[in-house]
Image (spheres, grey):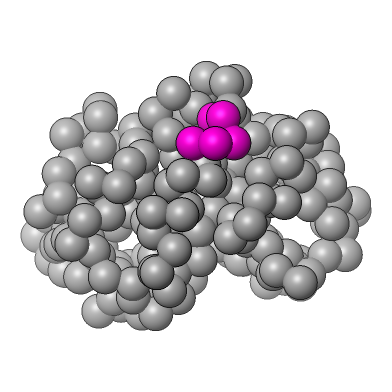
Amino acid sequence: MKRMFIAANWKSNITKNEAGIWLEAYSKNSVNTSSELVIFPPFTLLDFVSTFIKEKELNLKVGAQDISPFEKGSYTGEVSGELIKEFAEYVIIGHLERRRLLNEDKDLIFQKIDRALKNNLKILLCASNLEELAGIEDYEDMIIAFEPISAVGTKNPADLEIVRHFVNEIENRKSKIIYGGSINEENVKIYTDLENIHGVLVGSESLNVTSFINIISNVG
Ligand code: PGA
């Protein structure tokens, strides 16, 4: 059986108060699952969320939504791997929204990968097409999230054929591949049942704890 990876990307949402409510509700209704579950809160909540999870011994891990291309030092506003690794095990690199809205390019992505590796952070690399993966190795524990542009944040998940095609094109890679884009509790199983898809990256539907719990249950 495939061990699934289910990620909640909270993006630039969720206040500390809301995170407390989310986590309390999760701790009362958490699902017994063999899936690996990772929450990606905003930087402001990494400490709070990771401390809560540890204290309540929840079956959740924590990741950061981005990493600075610089090591720790005089880089105002940046959050370096050295600081992230105190709280998080994973880091997202190359999310579509950063590539498009902040013009993140391949060079920057390579620098971020380098910083993640140097700090032993596991990489969740997002790619919307094959070109974005070109030249990037399969690092240990790296996960690739296929996130087609038309599916992210649109409530319009990708056609299965598009996902199958992407997966087939990179079948020689060692990294686990997950799918992201408009996943909800009704459609999640359709994607996790696809051959060689090992999980999902969930955006908007992860903000509602009940929806996220149902997603985990429906993956089984
Ligand atoms: P969405 O976001 O589930 O809201 O489409 C997915 C993502 O951006 O990772």
Please give the name of the residue rendered at 52% of the width and 42% of the height, measured from the top-left corner. Answer: 163
Q: Is residue 160 a member of the stretch shown in magenta? A: yes
Please give the name of the residue rendered at 33% of the width and 54% of the height, measured from the top-left corner. Answer: 93
Residues in magenta? 158-162
Question: Residue 128 appears at what percent x and percent y?
Answer: 36, 39
**Image: 129 above or below 186:** below
Q: Is residue 3 a member of the stretch shown in magenta? A: no
| Depth order, front residue of 196/71 | 196
Total numbered circles: 0
**Left or right of 146, for residue 36:** right
User: Which image quarter is the N terminus in?
Assistant: bottom right
**Left or right of 23, for residue 15:** left
Please give the name of the residue rendered at 57% of the width and 21% of the height, measured from the top-left corner. Answer: 156
**Image: 22 above or below 117:** above
Identify the image quadrant of residue 5. Answer: bottom right
User: Which image quarter is the C terminus in?
Assistant: bottom right
Question: Residue 48 appears at what percent x and percent y?
Answer: 57, 56
Is there any visible trace of residue 7 in the rendered image? no
Question: Residue 150 appears at what percent x and percent y?
Answer: 44, 23
Q: Main secondary structure of the magenta part?
A: helix
**Left or right of 80, for residue 60:** right
| Depth order, front residue of 89/163 | 163
Is there any visible trace of residue 102 in the rendered image? yes
